[in-house]
């Protein structure tokens, strides 16, 4: 990960202070550190991550960050020489072929806020929404399975692959499915399997930060395609396909992250025809498939179901609807590309643990799984309604242009003169963590938008209280 100079300065100051306090001392909250150092919440998150990596602190979920006993080196380490080796030579920069390792957007999403902060940033379910008893039973049964410690097939257990194929439908079978360790790993694998270093990859102008991080780490160049109220602008996409001859397009057609847009059926048909005509691959990131809201119509079928040409490569994960610790996803593909995907998967992570796959099977084969999804759908509807009602009442100058039918987030446009970075920092000062809209921009542009998640707060009441706090103490500060 690349840490900015601001984070390094925070780390240097806190390291000196940690040396002078006993182990077990509680650090100031993230909110207080933001005010003290006058930096963003993401900078503080990066600094705490680096301190944790160096063994100087530990984060206790729901409690705070505490100092550890400093490691005393027998021989002082001089590692500054590494910086020169990590710099990209000018010749390669001019050639445009280099990797950029920057997971700052992901680090912000994965950070664990202090107990005093209401989390409106994370895309993972609060424990109250997770099927904990079902997960515990599935874990217990899978651990006792006679094959739990056997080495499984490279592509994953046949029964689990068959389940994913049947879920999607069409002519798919287990031979078209590759099991991977989560959606982010699937994106990384596909970026490498479907492209060559230096290639251009076409992405939505606003997109999930993990897509940008994976593409840049694979030495690819994301090219932003403008968005419309129906999703990716298909006229602009065709022009760029003609100009660049790019062979890889990435979309989130259902409950797009961050806007919440779901692409209509006729647009999906046009999108599929476009990529076929221009001989490109289309990565369909179907992250919200199991997050349908109870009061919404049925979700449109995935593009991969009816694409017999092999143009669409589909990603589907169990993580969002179950637990962040269940790292099971499926890559669905047709044709010769499937073997390349599996070879890339082998290089990336060898085998997916059999017990983890057996746990996933126990989970989805249980009658309680569908009951959980129905209950989760009702909770998602309730929380979306509560969030929108609170925004209308306490933040009437904020605009929410798209009402999601699935997923867990709202995309909010702030009134003038607010910028996303300033609003996110001011919100954290009021003990509310939300997502800076710049993290989702493939063009690295400024933003007046922020994303809020309504699944990480403990209850709808906490969600409403946090939004009331923003309306009462943050927005009014600009007037």
Image (spheres, grey):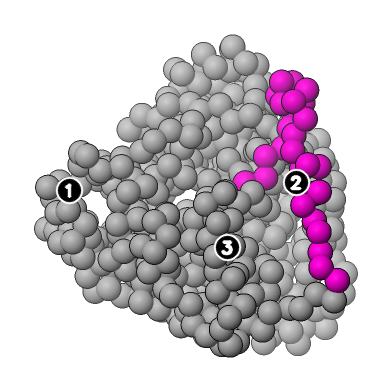
Mark 3 neighbour density, 10 Å: few (under 14) some (14–19) many (20 or more) = some
Asked if residue 297 is positioned above or below residue 207 in the image, the reply reads below
Pointer 2 or 1: first along the chain: 2
Query: What residue does disc 2 label?
Result: 83
Query: What residue does disc 1 label?
Result: 478
Q: Is residue 304 visible?
A: no
> Where is residue 420 drawn, in percent x and y?
34, 45
Left or right: 4 as drawn, with respect to 181: left
Asked if residue 275 is positioned above or below residue 317 in the image, the reply reads above
Q: Is residue 79 magenta?
A: yes
Q: Can you tell which of label 2 and label 1 is closer to the viewer?
A: 2
Left or right: 73 as drawn, with respect to 382: right
- Identified at 51% across, 28% down, the residue is 224
> Where is residue 451 drawn, in percent x and y?
36, 51
> Callout 1: helix, strand or loop?
helix
Asked if residue 165 is positioned above or below residue 111 in the image, the reply reads above
Left or right: 134 as drawn, with respect to 198: left
- Identified at 50% across, 21% down, the residue is 237
Q: Which residues are magenta?
A: 75-103
Quadrant in the picture for residue 148: bottom right
Q: Would you say the residues marked 3 and 2 are in contact, meaning their CB atoms lie under 8 Å apart?
A: no
Q: Is residue 254 magenta?
A: no
Pointer 3 or 2: first along the chain: 3
Q: Would you say the residues marked 2 and 1 are in contact, meaning their CB atoms lie under 8 Å apart?
A: no
Q: CA distance from mark 3 to mark 1?
A: 31 Å
- Identified at 56% across, 84% down, the residue is 21
> Callout 2: helix, strand or loop?
helix
> Callout 3: helix, strand or loop?
helix
């Amino acid at each position: 990960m690349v840490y900015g100079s601001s984070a390094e300065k925070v780390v240097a100051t806190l390291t000196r202070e940690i040396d002078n306090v006993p182990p077990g001392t509680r650090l100031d909250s993230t909110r207080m550190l933001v005010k003290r150092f006058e930096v963003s919440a993401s900078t503080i998150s990066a600094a705490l991550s680096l301190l944790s990596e160096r063994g100087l602190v530990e984060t206790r979920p729901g409690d705070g960050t505490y100092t550890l006993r400093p490691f005393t080196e027998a021989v002082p380490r001089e590692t500054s020489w590494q910086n020169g080796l990590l710099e990209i030579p000018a010749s390669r920069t001019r050639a445009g072929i280099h990797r950029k390792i920057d997971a700052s957007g992901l680090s912000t999403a994965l950070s664990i806020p202090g107990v005093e902060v209401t989390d409106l940033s994370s895309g993972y379910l609060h424990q109250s929404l997770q099927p904990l008893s079902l997960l515990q039973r599935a874990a217990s049964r899978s651990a006792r399975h006679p094959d739990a410690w056997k080495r499984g097939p490279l592509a994953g257990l046949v029964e689990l692959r068959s389940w994913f194929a049947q879920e999607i439908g069409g002519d798919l079978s287990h031979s078209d499915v590759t099991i991977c360790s989560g959606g982010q790993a699937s994106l990384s694998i596909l970026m490498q399997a479907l492209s060559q270093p230096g290639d251009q990859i076409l992405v939505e102008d606003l997109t999930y930060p993990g897509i940008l991080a994976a593409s840049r780490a694979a030495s690819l160049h994301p090219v932003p395609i403008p968005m419309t109220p129906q999703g990716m602008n298909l006229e602009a996409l065709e022009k760029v396909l003609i100009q660049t001859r790019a062979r890889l397009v990435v979309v989130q057609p259902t409950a797009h992250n961050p806007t919440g847009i779901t692409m209509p059926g006729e647009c999906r048909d046009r999108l599929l025809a476009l990529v076929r005509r221009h001989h490109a691959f289309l990565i369909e990131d179907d992250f919200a498939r199991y997050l349908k809201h109870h009061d919404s119509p049925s979700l449109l079928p995935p593009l991969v179901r009816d694409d017999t040409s092999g143009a669409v490569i589909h990603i589907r994960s169990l993580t969002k609807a179950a637990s962040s610790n269940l790292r099971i996803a499926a890559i669905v593909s047709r044709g010769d590309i499937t073997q390349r995907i599996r070879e890339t998967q082998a290089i990336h992570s060898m085998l997916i643990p059999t017990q983890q796959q057996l746990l996933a099977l126990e989970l989805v084969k249980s009658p309680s799984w569908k009951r959980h999804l129905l209950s989760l759908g009702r909770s998602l509807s309730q929380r979306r309604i509560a969030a929108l009602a609170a925004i209308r009442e306490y933040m009437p100058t904020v605009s929410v242009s798209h009402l999601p039918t699935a997923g867990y987030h709202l995309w909010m446009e702030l009134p003038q003169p607010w910028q996303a970075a300033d609003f996110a920092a001011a919100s954290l000062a009021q003990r509310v963590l939300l997502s800076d809209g710049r993290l989702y921009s493939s063009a690295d542009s400024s933003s007046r938008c922020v994303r809020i998640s309504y699944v990480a707060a403990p209850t709808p009441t906490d969600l409403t209280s946090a939004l009331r706090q923003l309306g009462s103490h943050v927005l009014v500060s600009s007037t």
